[in-house]
Image (tube, rainbow, N blue to C red):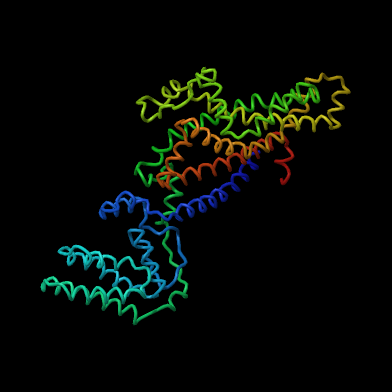
Amino acid sequence: MLRYLIRRIALAIPTLAIISLIAFSMSRLRTIDPVKIEYWQDSVAYLTKARKLGLDQPQFYFSLSSAAFPATWHQILPLETRRHLEQWVWQTGNWPATQRFWHSITSQLTPALQPLSGPLLIQFKALRNYDQLADMPGALADLQRRVDTLPDLALRSTLQVQLDRIQHDYQAIASQPQQWKLYVPVLYWYGLNNQYHQWAGGFVTGDPGVSSVTGNPLLTELRPRLLTTLIVNGWAMLLAYLIGVPLGVFMARRQSMPFDKWASAILMFLYAMPVMWLGSLLVLLLSRQDIGLGIIDGLNAEPWLLSGKTYAQWAWDSREQFVLPVLTLTVHSLAILAMQMRGGVLEVVKQDYIRTARAKGLSETLVYWRHAFRNALFPIITIFATYFPALFSGSLVVEYLLNFPGMGTKMESAFNNNDYSVLFAMVLFVAFLTVLGNLVADMLFAWADPRVRFARR
């Protein structure tokens, strides 16, 4: 059994590594700069937070790039500037000349623009916003005409020096194109000091980083929410199995009888009903005072961090708010579990060894629970591999519906605030649950049927 467990874990580790690569790559496909939203006017604060988030580090251990781009490309901040310069380099292939030109129209020009205002100031600043370098000569010529009409000779002289420098650096780009570099591949090796290594290593060591919006550690952001969601899922799974498995056996023993027919119809109706509708129905039935019973005050639980209590005390005081999400997930899940258990038992009782047990005079209770039950568990075990992560995903919907302070409401707020650090940390956790569910299912298969673990020995 131990050797079988080790083999399954050895297969699970590379699976999680591949999933982490996909999740990390998706998180870096964002088009919105998470730091620019908050510090779009404060460049010092922007650089401080961007470096804290690791945006100035390479994304992976290596990169396959074009010879036109330098090895230090990842150090260019803000990200908007990096994307803009990338467009220019793809047009010229000459990174040194492009860098000098950008330096001329940004940092060197700033002191000279302080006395300016109005259209001329806007036109100088607009130089850095041109996507096509081919449009630059016309813009520089128009700017030259405006500078020539300035009445202040001292200001005109200062701006002319800067404008000459800009024109000189642009001519260097125009006269020295190096597009051939764009077709020369280059491999840059960065080692362990990269964003992916720190991101993935943080999950292993228990320090998965910080939120890109609030700046708080992700453990502080997610731990209470995650624990709350796990409590809801744990109780829902426990109740679903405790009710669904015996119910399935009971229905199988009464096949084609009125109880079996009515129970099958009700269970199929519950399973076909979307979890959002089922949760809404339970809210109307159990929580509303006007049209329902009004026996549960299960909405709008206070978040733990705002309560000032210990987590255990908060969970106990909020126990009534746990009822509706647990009940919704339990009712939705036990339907498929009971129907699968019923089908598994009916398939097993047709086997020869069941007929032999009956021929020996064993009671029906012993036949079903001692001989048929264990072999009928295989469909239930198969479901478990996908049931745990699916239950977790369903709880996110239920928590959002009931305004319950779990991972569901946290995911909704992270999505609205473009907090990709939180979103993809949750994606990786759901992936971990999926792999864990398959691993547990493999162990249950090995327990239920020893032939599984001895198959390849």
Between 381 and 126, the one nearer to me in the picture: 126
x then y, percent, for residue 113: 19, 65
Q: Quadrant of residue 75?
A: bottom left
Above/below status of 135 relative to 308:
below
> Would residue 96 be seen by someone viewing this image from the given angle?
no
Q: Residue at x 59, y 44 (%)?
A: 9
User: Among all residues in the image, which is located at the extreme bottom?
Assistant: 175
x then y, percent, for residue 234: 55, 29
The N terminus lies in quadrant: top right
Q: Residue at x 42, y 71 (%)?
A: 90
The C terminus lies in quadrant: top right
Q: Residue at x 25, y 64 (%)?
A: 122
Q: Quadrant of residue 395?
A: top right
> Would residue 320 be seen by someone viewing this image from the given angle?
yes
x then y, percent, for residue 389: 57, 39
Left or right for 449, reference 173: right
User: Among all residues in the image, which is located at the extreme right?
Assistant: 359
Above/below status of 401 relative to 56:
above
Left or right for 123, reference 247: left
Q: Residue at x 40, y 29 (%)?
A: 304
Labels in figure, total: 0
Q: Quadrant of residue 167?
A: bottom left
Left or right for 334, reference 255: left
